[in-house]
Image: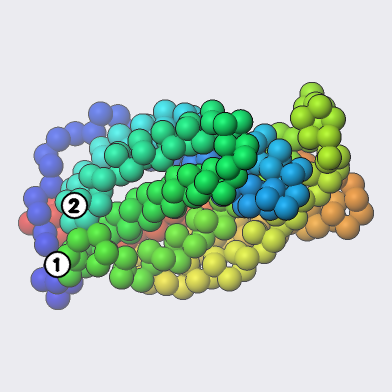
């Protein structure tokens, strides 16, 4: 019954260019590095947009928005360059699944490149025309809003494809990109990604503006370092707290045939380590000891992200394995 409910194509009879375990390791590491800078790019754009709106009433937030925007294009470039590696590796490891998902979402998948180009051009225009739009702030904000909408849409295409490639039994039901969004796990995964983006960006803001070499009095005279660090910590804390909703929502919408005890142990370990990190962050906020445990918090969050990346691959391997065996027997 399982075999009859989904297409069973022939596998590609070519050897992998290197051991599978090494490709998997490189995929997990390169993807996590890529998604880190995607988070910082998207989170920076979102914060810049919000702070510019706040800056309509309080000028100091507009200046803070400009300082954050300086980092966006750098993080954008790193996200693009590092993103080549996981894209190539996933094409190598999961060729039939990835290309099948791409074909089923068709125009949406092809549109990623022009959409990203448009968003990047708008970001550069917004950044370098800041002074010219000094007296046209609403128009300037609207321009950034267009880039933000595009940047928020692109990950949704990626996530729909990544989810679709895991479930060959759903391929016959898909009629383009929008129907792929009906797969149960796509929207929860997207919400989990967005809140994670905000949390990571908060830690970045803490480190970027909190470093000793940053000339806070010169660049942002209306702020103190402790004030920005406290706001950044709160942003991370509350965004991570929201994962108490979006994390379980993501997990319980996963089709259960890919869930096993190995995956459960990985997720539980990640949650426990994240809980320790958030406890330390909360203690720093409560005791006004901002930055005292920052390195420890970063290390713990990094371990959590690594475990989640490992868990993500574990689920992908589990859910695809039965279909791979069917292809081998076909």
Q: Residue at x 30, y 34 (%)?
A: 88
Q: Is residue 108 left or right of residue 189?
A: left
In the rendered image, the residue lying farthest to the front is 135
Q: Which mark is residue 287?
A: none
Q: Residue at x 54, y 31 (%)?
A: 129
Q: Nearer the viewer, residue 128 or 297?
A: 128
The residue wearing badge 1 is 172
What is the x, y in percent for residue 59? Answer: 74, 44
What is the x, y in percent for residue 166? Answer: 29, 58
Residue 194 higher or lower than 63, as above or below: below
The residue wearing badge 2 is 106
Q: Nearer the viewer, residue 94 or 20?
A: 94
Residue 124 higher or lower than 254, as above or below: above
Q: How many marks?
A: 2
Q: Nearer the viewer, mark 1 or mark 2?
A: 2
Q: Is residue 319 left or right of residue 221?
A: left
Q: Quadrant of residue 186?
A: bottom left
Q: Residue at x 57, y 54 (%)?
A: 196
Instruction: Quote the CA–CA distance across marks 1 and 2.
Output: 14 Å
Q: Crowding at label 2, few (<14), some or many (≥20) Cα neighbours within 10 Å?
A: some
Quarter holding the N terminus is: bottom left
Does the image show residue 247? yes
Q: Crowding at label 1, few (<14), some or many (≥20) Cα neighbours within 10 Å?
A: few
Q: Nearer the viewer, residue 228 or 266?
A: 228
What is the x, y in percent for residue 32? Answer: 49, 41
Does the image show residue 148? no
Quarter holding the C terminus is: bottom left
Q: Quadrant of residue 291?
A: top right
Please, what secondary structure does the residue beneath circle 2 have? loop
Please, what secondary structure does the residue beneath circle 1 have? helix
- Disc with the residue nearer the chain's start (1 vs 2): 2
The answer to whether the residues at label 1 and label 2 have Cβ atoms under 8 Å apart is no
């Amino acid at each position: 019954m399982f075999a009859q409910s989904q297409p069973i194509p022939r596998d590609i009879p070519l050897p992998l260019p290197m051991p599978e375990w090494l490709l998997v390791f490189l995929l997990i590491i390169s993807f996590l590095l890529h998604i880190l800078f995607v988070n910082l790019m998207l989170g920076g754009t979102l914060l810049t947009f919000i702070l510019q709106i706040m800056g309509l009433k309080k000028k100091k937030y507009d200046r803070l928005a400009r300082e954050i925007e300086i980092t966006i294009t750098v993080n954008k470039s790193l996200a693009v360059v590092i993103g080549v590696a996981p894209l190539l590796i996933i094409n190598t490891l999961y060729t039939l699944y990835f290309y099948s998902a791409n074909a089923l979402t068709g125009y949406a998948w092809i549109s990623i490149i022009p959409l990203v180009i448009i968003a990047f051009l708008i970001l550069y225009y917004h950044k370098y025309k800041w002074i010219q739009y000094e007296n046209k702030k609403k128009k300037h904000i609207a321009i950034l809003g267009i880039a933000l909408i595009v940047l928020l849409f692109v990950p949704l295409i990626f996530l729909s494809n990544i989810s679709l490639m895991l479930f060959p039994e759903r391929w016959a039901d898909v009629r383009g990109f929008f129907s792929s969004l009906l797969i149960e796990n796509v929207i929860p995964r997207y919400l989990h990604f967005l809140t994670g983006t905000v949390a990571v960006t908060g830690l970045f803001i803490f480190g970027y503006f909190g470093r000793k070499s940053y000339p806070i009095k010169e660049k942002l005279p209306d702020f103190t370092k402790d004030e920005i660090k406290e706001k950044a910590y709160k942003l991370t804390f509350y965004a991570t707290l929201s994962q108490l909703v979006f994390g379980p929502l993501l997990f319980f919408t996963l089709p259960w045939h890919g869930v096993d005890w190995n995956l459960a142990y990985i997720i539980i370990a990640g949650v426990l380590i994240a809980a320790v990190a958030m406890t330390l962050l909360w203690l720093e906020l409560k005791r006004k000891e901002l930055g005292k445990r920052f390195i420890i918090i970063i290390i713990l969050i990094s371990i959590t992200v690594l475990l989640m990346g490992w868990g993500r691959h574990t689920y992908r391997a589990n859910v695809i394995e039965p279909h791979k065996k069917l292809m081998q027997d076909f």
